Image (cartoon, rainbow, N blue to C red):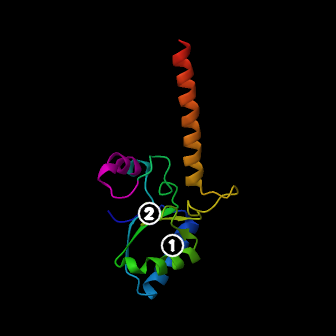
Amino acid sequence: MPADFAGLDPTAQQNLMAALDELRRNRIRFNVTSAYRSPERQAQLYADRATNPYPVAPPGHSDHERGRAADLVLADESQRDAANRILAKYGWSQPLPERDRVHYAFGRQRSQTPTAYGQSPVDMAKQFSRALGDQLDEAVGAALFAA
């Protein structure tokens, strides 16, 4: 199924087309495998996520559905840094480069970017999860011994 560029946010689409033109001029070979996704297509991909080598967001939570994402596969991974620099000039970045190297979002920052608290959102989520888990363990333990 060819990528749906028509469903992209107009500014995202304009900037993606300009970035892709520059990639071509720099002899970086690529294939855009996905851009805009309908909610139905996102639901289908999510249902089949076990067969997908990359993460798939639940329906209603994907930048693809908002018309602000594209998946770009490079013919030569050694050109990823050069491609990233070009795409970044046009507002496209990889929010999850370690987990989903083909996914680019328009107008978003990498998930590893430090927050105002000096930690990445991923590290903050891990810390919150551990703290919540400790509180739940204490509450469950207290309830069991109180009975």
* Quadrant for the N terminus in the image: bottom left
What are the residue bounds of the magenta stretch? 42-55
Residue type at tag 1:
Leu
Mark 2 crowd level (few <14, some 14–19, many ≥20, 10 Å Cα): many
The label number, if any, that marks residue 16 in the structure image: 1
Q: Residue 135: give its label.
A: none
Q: Amino acid at mark 2?
A: Ala
Q: Which x, y percent locates residue 72?
A: 41, 69
The residue lying at 50 percent from left, 49 percent from top is 61
Q: Residue at x 52, y 79 (%)?
A: 86
Q: Secondary structure at mark 1?
A: helix
Residue contact between numbered discs 2 and 1, judged by CB atoms under 8 Å: yes
- Does residue 34 lie above or below 88 as drawn? above
First of labels 2, 1 by sequence position: 1
Q: Quadrant of residue 108?
A: bottom right
Q: Secondary structure at mark 2?
A: loop
Marker disc for residue 35:
2
Q: Position of residue 13 (x, y in %)?
A: 52, 69
Determine if the magenta segment contains residue 53: yes
Q: Is residue 49 left or right of residue 106?
A: left
State the residue lying farthest toward the right: 116
Where's residue 85, x and y in %? Answer: 53, 78
> Eyeballing the image, is 101 above or below 77?
above
Residue 63 image offset from top left, x and y in percent: 51, 56
CA–CA distance in space, label 2 to label 1: 10 Å
